[in-house]
Amino acid sequence: MKKKVMIVGSGFRGFCDALHLMDNPDLELQIVDSAPFFGGVMHSLDIEGFAVDKGVHIFDSIPVSLAETVTEIMDGQVHEIDFVSASAFNNKVTEQFSLPDLNSLDDASVKEQIRQELLTLAKESPTGLPANLEEYFEQRYGKTAAGIFSQIFHKVYGLTSAEVEPTAIAQTSMGRLKFLDDDAMRELKQDPWLDTVLAARRKSMGKIDDFVSIYPSDGNAMRGWCERAVKWLEAKGVAVKLGVKIEKIEEDDNGVRVHTNNGVIEVDTVLWSNDSIKALGDAIDIPDDVDGLQYGTPMMFATLLTQADKVRDFTYLQNFDPDQLTYRTAASGRFSHQVRPDGVSFLTAECPIQIGSENWNNPDAMGQKVWDEIKNLGVVDQDAELVAADIKRIPVTFKLAKTGYAKAFTDFHQKVANNHKRVILRDVTPFFRRDIYFDSAHLGELIA
Ligand SMILES: Cc1cc2nc3c(=O)[nH]c(=O)nc-3n(C[C@H](O)[C@H](O)[C@H](O)COP(=O)(O)OP(=O)(O)OC[C@H]3O[C@@H](n4cnc5c(N)ncnc54)[C@H](O)[C@@H]3O)c2cc1C
């Protein structure tokens, strides 16, 4: 008899778990999700007739084996993304760079201060374990640059860097520091320690590894991929059940009874492939301390319609200016091949915000403000016109681990493992699709 495995969560994690298990002939797989659609955060919205991803979602820097699967699911309809990125800070734009460029600072003495602090750090090569992200920034970039990075972090994520685990660095675009021009950075990078900390732009990106970046080209954005993925999985024998809410999970020596809004489902193993720890705790009656330690960054999400030929050739621009509204602006309409017959396409802009703030309470006023800001940043031509704007309030986007999360998660994980041999809580630390894919590759050992 085949072993029945229920994967809870149809986001990319659940997909990858299914992908890595489905060739095992001894397993019968089903994916369940409480949402009525497949794909979690990858499932695009329907705005003004366009399929609009909730933020920038690209299969970026993924291994060839995963790219082949994505391509197969898309019946070959994918195109490579040739990143044209830019970043903004202090009202200046740095082309071909997606991290904050502190070289945009006007005050040369601040840059000199950063240089001196880095040279001191390079002599010490600090190795101690930082307690939070603020300490991580200080150990890596020195006090002055750390202070600026912490301000930027606060702008984007709405939390101070002292409030989050140092591992949050993996979710940010602050893993390297650039604070002078490229030649000066390259010179500093001669030092082996500084080489691991500093960034300089390359003349050409070239091919830096065996990873590829692709995106669906059928004009349905990521939602198209999500919908095709369901059919592909079903054709491979994986059942997909959407709109299924799990209420209780009971386990004995014979198996697991999963009580849902749709009746009881009996399986041998449950794989909890999502980060809703509280929902699992409630279902198996184990209290958790994790819930309050997860912070979801709220965003205002702007979709701005304009003529495609007025949009500059870029993939995305990350604006790190703490005083400005936008964070990441993307030419999503163009790279998702969505241009209406009248030539209109769209840009998207993720705008970090505090829930309850004036802008949060007046979404309709945001469209024009965001448009004016991105025009200033040069991502659309000066004579471009805003055809329409849609503003959505998204209370939870990037999820960050507050300090204490790692310990609380490990404790909860241990309790689940001790009390429920047939319920496996997946590690939710891997963030990028590539890392999630690699992490799922080890699943076989857990299921055996
Ligand atoms: C705005 C944004 C942009 C990103 N862009 C990129 C990118 O371009 N490239 C990249 O590599 N990574 C990107 N990431 C990171 C990466 O996409 C995500 O880490 C990954 O897609 C998350 O997949 P997931 O399955 O863990 O979570 P989710 O996509 O959130 O899926 C979790 C699923 O579990 C379901 N679920 C939750 N609780 C329950 C329950 N109790 N019962 C049943 N179902 C439940 C949810 O409904 C959801 O469908 C981005 C992340 C965000 C937030």
Image (spheres, grey):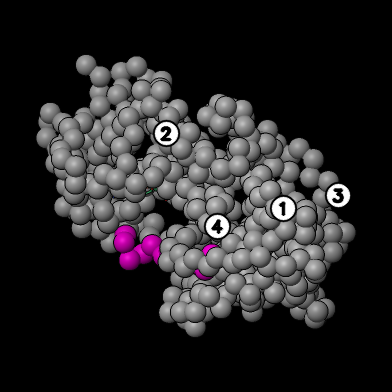
Disc 4 to disc 1, C-alpha distance: 14 Å
Indicate the position of residue 69 as horizontal and vertical percent values: 54, 28
Disc 4 to disc 3, C-alpha distance: 39 Å
Disc 3 to disc 1, C-alpha distance: 33 Å
Q: Which residue is mark 4?
A: 48
> Label 2 near label 3: C-beta < 8 Å?
no
Indicate the position of residue 348 as horizontal and vertical percent values: 61, 60
Helix, strand or loop at label 2? It is helix
Q: Nearer the viewer, mark 4 or mark 3?
A: 4
- Is 59 in front, or is 190? 59
- Is 342 in front, or is 338? 342
Asked if ligand 1 lies within 8 A of label 1, the reply is: no
Q: Is residue 3 left or right of residue 64?
A: left
Q: Nearer the viewer, mark 1 or mark 2?
A: 1
Q: Which residue is mark 1?
A: 343
Q: Which residue is mark 3?
A: 203
- Is 274 in front, or is 31? 31
Helix, strand or loop at label 4? It is loop
